[in-house]
Image (tube, helix red, strand yellow):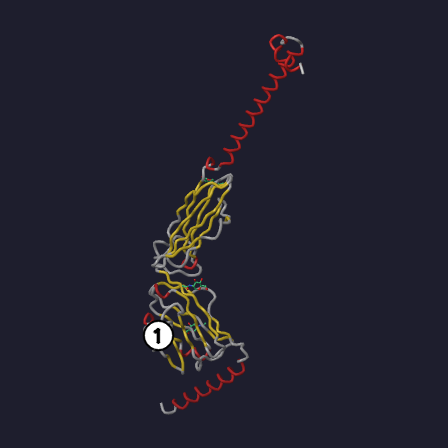
Amino acid sequence: MKTALPCCWLCTMLMYIITISSTSSDTGGTVQVVGSAEPIVALVGDDVILPCTLRPTVSAVYQTVEWQRPDLKPKEVHLYRDEKDDLALQNRLFGGRTSLFKEELVEGNASLKLTRVELSDAGNYTCYVPLLDHQKTTIQLIVGESTHLLTTQSPLRDRSHEIKGAASRPVISIEGIKGDEVVLRCEAEGCYPEPVMEWCDVHGRVLPAAGPPETSRDREGCYTVTSHVIVPKTDNNTFTCRVQQPEIKHMKERRVHIPDQMFPTQCQSSWLTGLVAALVGVAVGVAVVAGGLSLLIKIGMLTISMEPWTSVMQNP
Ligand SMILES: *[C@@H]1O[C@H](CO)[C@@H](O)[C@H](O)[C@H]1NC(C)=O
Ligand SMILES: *[C@@H]1O[C@H](CO)[C@@H](O)[C@H](O)[C@H]1NC(C)=O
Ligand SMILES: *[C@@H]1O[C@H](CO)[C@@H](O)[C@H](O)[C@H]1NC(C)=O
């Protein structure tokens, strides 16, 4: 025991010296605080690691590392400084659930471990290292509630029975006619994360929506997403509205078939054709009758009956 202590002390000193030298050699602003561009997904009750590392590898042992949730008050999630945790300002939501990997700090690993994840933990976390040019990185945590484990390889499918907050089956309605096209409306509700909505044709090709989706959020934080599409008549008027929450691998869709008669084009054009045909018919008829009459007049067969009229016409 007595020999172990000085050795330990020596190790610490050595590490300190290595840290100082590597820090000073890297302080050209080249050290980066790296998090995760991809959101981190966890399920209620899980333990999760929010990644934050210093790259190239630099010890974080003598740094101040501040984990925060900027949307909360107080925003402190976990503060490490002067080589120890300082949880005096920690938000009570995280009480007893946060820790850093102390033995990994020397490797520049300042990742946060959050245990027993709750739905309210969903949000954006920042890992802030003030001494490294005030660098911070933001990591998004998504929380699902599920009886099944979701991995990045899990296929997108209907998970409404597994995950609270998964989007509902969309509802499609016909909103009206625009020119010779039909306007469709699709609406779905989902709690977290924000659902993404898209329209597809019968071959699965994504159709451009008529404007950006409209999103509203209620007091519980649940979203209602609405999207419109304007569709021309096609050979198979089948359209799909799909709502997805890729982070929780959830997908739900509804198909609609629009009867041909809904499209005004056909109907209007046949009506127009009919009208034109009728007008032409009437015109031809009139011409034939007029021609016949003038022929009769010319050959003198109608002189008597037409006399008063023709005399008036010819007199001046
Ligand atoms: C940090 O250390 C923890 C604990 O060993 C490990 O699980 C995690 O993957 C490490 N993070 C990075 C980014 O290396
Ligand atoms: C977190 O950040 C992402 C991307 O920057 C953003 O889309 C999202 O709305 C944020 N979430 C919250 C809860 O602030
Ligand atoms: C056309 O729509 C019907 C449903 O109305 C569907 O059963 C059929 O498979 C569709 N045809 C093609 C080629 O997709």
* Observer-nearest of 83 and 182: 182
How many numbered marks, from 0 up? 1
* Observer-nearest of 201 and 14: 201
Q: Residue 50 at what x, y percent from top left? A: 41, 70
Q: Residue 307 at what x, y percent from top left? A: 62, 10
Residue 41 image-quadrant placement = bottom left
313 left or right of 272 in image: right
Residue 288 image-quadrant placement = top right
Where is 69 relative to 274, above or below? below
- Identify the residue at horizontal 44%, vertical 61% (top origin): 152
Residue 49 image-quadrant placement = bottom left
Residue lying furthest front:
316
Q: Residue 120 at what x, y percent from top left? A: 35, 64
Q: Quadrant of the N terminus?
A: bottom left
The type of residue carrying mark 1 is: Gln
Where is 269 relative to 255, above or below? above
Q: Which residue is mark 1?
A: 90
* Observer-nearest of 314 and 44: 314
> Cβ of disc 1 within 8 Å of ligand 2?
no
- Identify the residue at horizontal 43%, vertical 44% (top origin): 255
* Observer-nearest of 248 and 194: 194
Where is 149 relative to 136, above or below? above
Check disc 1: other Cα within 10 Å, few if <14, some if 14-19, many if 20+.
many
The residue tagged with tag 1: helix, strand or loop?
loop
- Identify the residue at horizontal 38%, vertical 59% (top origin): 192
Q: Quadrant of the C terminus?
A: top right
Q: Residue 21 at what x, y percent from top left? A: 51, 85
